[in-house]
Image: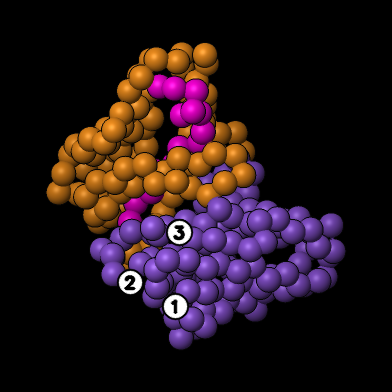
Amino acid sequence: GESVGLHLPTLSVQEGDNSIINCAYSNSASDYFIWYKQESGKGPQFIIDIRSNMDKRQGQRVTVLLNKTVKHLSLQIAATQPGDSAVYFCAESLPSEKLVFGKGMKLTVNP
Amino acid sequence: GAVVSQHPSWVICKSGTSVKIECRSLDFQATTMFWYRQFPKQSLMLMATSNEGSKATYEQGVEKDKFLINHASLTLSTLTVTSAHPEDSSFYICSARDRRDRAYEQYFGPGTRLTVT
């Protein structure tokens, strides 16, 4: 099949700034959404999740916003640190309970 | 808690040979395990879903005779890449769902880097 996404979108921020990573999901029937962080050569690491009956959820330094009207998900990272540098993926859980991952965004934090 | 391991972490094999990758849930029982494949700079793509004691369900376009999945126990699933070719070189990641948890939670393994020469 066709290869897509050979160039990951990249977001570069300065240490201490806030970062916002956006994601568009595909299935309006999805009712659970998760953000994962993936460092090079490692498996995905859970960051935060949100159910479709909520529009905002906060964790430690992270906030997820869900806009079901436009099928949009965002991850906000406060006071970004060099250790936050990684690729971030959103994932939606279909009614079949399978996870579908978004294309991902590479976050680079400059000291 | 909720640790998933994979073995090996990386493997190099010759074209035409078969490779087995193990996925274990270390501190919980997993009724369902998932296998994903990830090519460089791309997202994770679900290959198959395996339920303990039953046949795996493969995603469209994934050859079940090439990617053999066995989920013989509640803590172990294996993926065997048969007659591997260079285009099978990829990062293979498994995840497991804790049978006690809410239905959506998946715990991911660290991945296995397969290189076929």
| Residue annotated with mark 3 | B3
Binning the other alpha carbons within 10 Å of mark 1 as few (below 14), some (14 to 19) or many (20 upward) gives many
**SS of the residue under disc 1:** loop
| Labels in figure, total | 3
Residue type pointed to by label 3: Val
Of tags 2 and 3, which is closer to the observer? 3
Q: Is residue A40 above or below residue B54?
A: above
Residue at position x 45%, y 15% from top? A15
Q: Are marks 2 and 1 in contact (CB under 8 Å)?
A: yes
Residue at position x 31%, y 52% from top? A27
Chain A rendered in what hue? orange
Numbered mark located on residue B99 in the image: 2
In the displayed structure, does residue B92 sit left or right of residue A79?
right
| Image quarter hosting the C terminus of chain B | bottom right
Nearest the camera: B111 or A7? B111
| Residue annotated with mark 1 | B74
Query: Could you tell me if residue B14 is visible in this image?
Result: yes
Residue type pointed to by label 1: Leu
Residue type pointed to by label 2: Arg
Question: Is label 2 on the same chain as label 3?
Answer: yes
> In the rendered image, what is the letter of the chain coloured purple?
B
The range drawn in magenta is A80-94
Q: Is residue B1 above or below residue A12?
A: below
Q: Is residue B113 above or below residue A98?
A: above
Residue at position x 48%, y 48% from top? A44
Binning the other alpha carbons within 10 Å of mark 3 as few (below 14), some (14 to 19) or many (20 upward) gives some
